[in-house]
Image (spheres, helix red, strand yellow):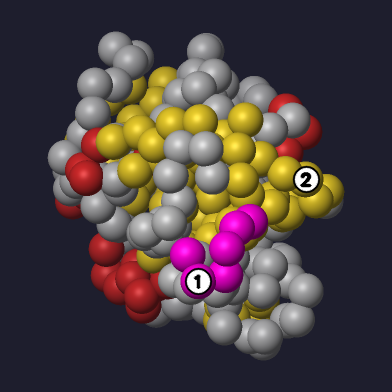
Amino acid sequence: MQIAEGRITEIISGFNDKFALRIDCSLEMIPAPGEYLLAYEIGDAAAIADSVLAVPLFQVWDSSSAALQPSYPIPSSWKPGSTLILRGPLGHGFKIPGDIRHLALATLGQDISRLLPLLNQFPNTDIALFSNAMLPDLPLVVEAHPLSALPDSLIWADILVMDLPMKDLPKLRQILSLEHQESIPCLAQALILTPMPCGSIAECGVCAVPARKGYKLACKDGPVFDLNKLKW
């Protein structure tokens, strides 16, 4: 984990009304897929009054673009030229074996951006994307399916990778058509999207995720978790 300055060079209007930032900073500060940065603005206190808490930033879209997307709307004072204090990379990202043959990606929300950096990392892998969200142009090797097709594909997949808002965790068993206490029949990881204001410094508990044994903190133990070790 490092602390460094970065400068916003561009605010990009992305897909589904999402925005991402291009930030001029050292390459060491760019988080791997699933990891995050915390960003604070430097400037006049009155001008940045709506930026009291740090904003988590995730790598999105093509991994070569180094675009970073906030997990909630950016403060109105953030503009091209704004200087940020960056802390990170933080947390645990996706850990996907390099020899997999079948990769299933899924999102329960309306944004697949945080999964897109994975698409070009597995050239010899069959990839299927399951989502009810509107989709951008995808590589030809990626098959797109509605979320309802996911339960029948769990046997096909070597690993399931999800972008999962915390509020949707209780719905997961029904969506995957699993019985009570039944585990997912393949490796499974999920980026649990939840507020992470302290970035593991204070262990404030705002981002607590129910696990099979107690709770885990998304800011420190995640935000990517082994789904079979969570309670849902």
Tag 1 secondary structure: loop
- Residue range (magenta): 42-47
Residue 58 horizontal/vertical position (percent) = 53, 46
Magenta highlight on residue 50: no
Residue 164, relative to residue 37: is it above or below?
A: below
Name the mark on residue 46: 1
* Residue 227 coordinates in the image, percent (x, y): 54, 62
Residue at the image point whose x is 83% and y is 48% from the top:
2
Q: CA distance from mark 2 to mark 1?
A: 23 Å
Q: Residues within 10 Å of mark 2 (few under 14, many from 20)?
A: some
Question: Do we see residue 151 in this rendering?
Answer: no
Compared with 189, 80 (above or below) is above
Q: Earlier in the sequence, mark 2 or mark 1?
A: 2
Residue depicted at x 64% and y 23%:
99
Query: Please, what secondary structure does the residue beneath circle 2 have?
Result: strand
Mark identifier at residue 117: none
Can you tell which quarter of the image residue 135 is in? top left
Main secondary structure type of the part rendered in magenta: loop
Amino acid type, label 1:
Ala
- The numbered disc on residue 4 is 2
Select label 2 or label 1 by which is in front: 1
Quarter occupied by the C terminus:
bottom left
Q: Nearer the viewer, residue 177 or 32?
A: 32
Quick check: marks 2 and 1 in contact, CB under 8 Å?
no
Residue at point 57% right, 63% down? Answer: 44
Q: Position of residue 202 (x, y in %)?
A: 75, 81
Q: Give the amino acid type for the residue marked by disc 2 in the picture.
A: Ala
Is residue 38 visible in the rendered image? The answer is yes
- Residue nearest the viewer, comparing 89 with 216: 89
Front residue of 174/72: it is 72
